[in-house]
Image: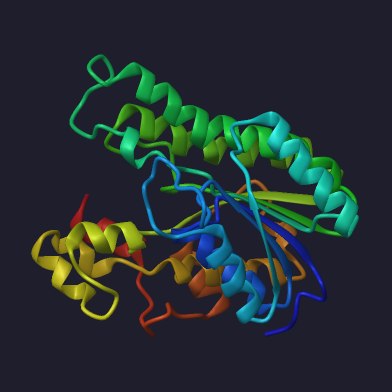
Amino acid sequence: MQQADGKIALVAGATRGAGRAIAIKLGETGATVYVTGRTTRKHTSPMKRKETIEETAELVTKAGGKGVPLQIDHTYEGQVQALVEEIQQNEGRLDIAVNDVWGGDPLTDWMAAVGDHNLRNGLQLLQQAVTSHIITTHYAVPLLRKSNQALLIEITDGTDYSYRGNFYYSLAKISNIHMASAAAHDLRKDRITACAVTPGFLRSEAMLDLFGVTEDNWQDGVKQDPHFIASETPFYLGEAIKHLSLDPNFQRFSGKVLSTWELSDIYNFNDADGRRPHWGNYYNEHLT
């Protein structure tokens, strides 16, 4: 694996889960990674989780990079503008920007149809999962233009426009996909490659807690959901982003929707536990 040669990255929404794993894996390449989120050691976000951006930054540095934690709520334009100005002042450019802000779990009512779902919660979900990405992209693009070959990544769920079990959740994740496609068209002359990347069934910290298991005994979660057997750690997605960022020809993926299982086949890597889950095949065999 080659090194990132001092690449500068921003992982927006890196407190836990996929964002944390992506930041750590970029750190393994020697990159400087700005990790943002709402939860710090002094402040807990409405997600009410214990993970913090300081912990993520320390893990990035431990992995071989330089982690820089900044408390940012990406739904606030002024905070994002100040973030990008700080990166500009410190680094002079941005090579990789990852939009992973979510925070929609407590806002999603999976049992409620569109006319019955709490409207305020639904709109707040879209504010966090879509508007925040737009704001971040808006301010990041001028700095991405200063890179010789920049990468703009939307983290989504799924590879197509099909329904995802909830009106607002579907709208958010499908929007992330189209944002990558539209950005790719807009930025094709700027040496900026935009794409979307999805994990499969993500075995995040929150999902492990939900099933009452740990990473050591995660397979016990199959008793509650048989499809959990095909789940993957957040580091599978992190490994995918790491390999993508180091690919000298990653521009060939501009405008595409990529997946952990597809990229694992392309770049020949495994998950942190040594497995190579393929959610695409599993879904086709068991859920269609």
Q: Is residue 85 above or below residue 287?
A: above
Frontmost residue, 154 versus 26: 26
Check the image and report above or below for 165 versus 206.
above
Residue at image position (59%, 32%) is: 75
Q: Is residue 91 visible?
A: yes
Query: At which x and y percent is residue 99?
Result: 60, 47
Q: In the image, is residue 266 above or below residue 92? A: below
Residue at screen point 59% across, 35% down: 132
Residue 188 visible here: no
Q: Position of residue 207 (x, y in %)?
A: 28, 58
Relative to residue 132, is residue 119 drawn left or right? left
Residue at image location 72% in from the left, 31% down from the top? 78
Q: Residue at left 42%, top 48%?
A: 157
**Above or below: residue 211 compared with residue 38:** below
Q: Residue furthest top?
A: 115
Q: Position of residue 204 (x, y in %)?
A: 36, 62
Q: Which residue is at the front of the view, 125 or 227?
A: 125
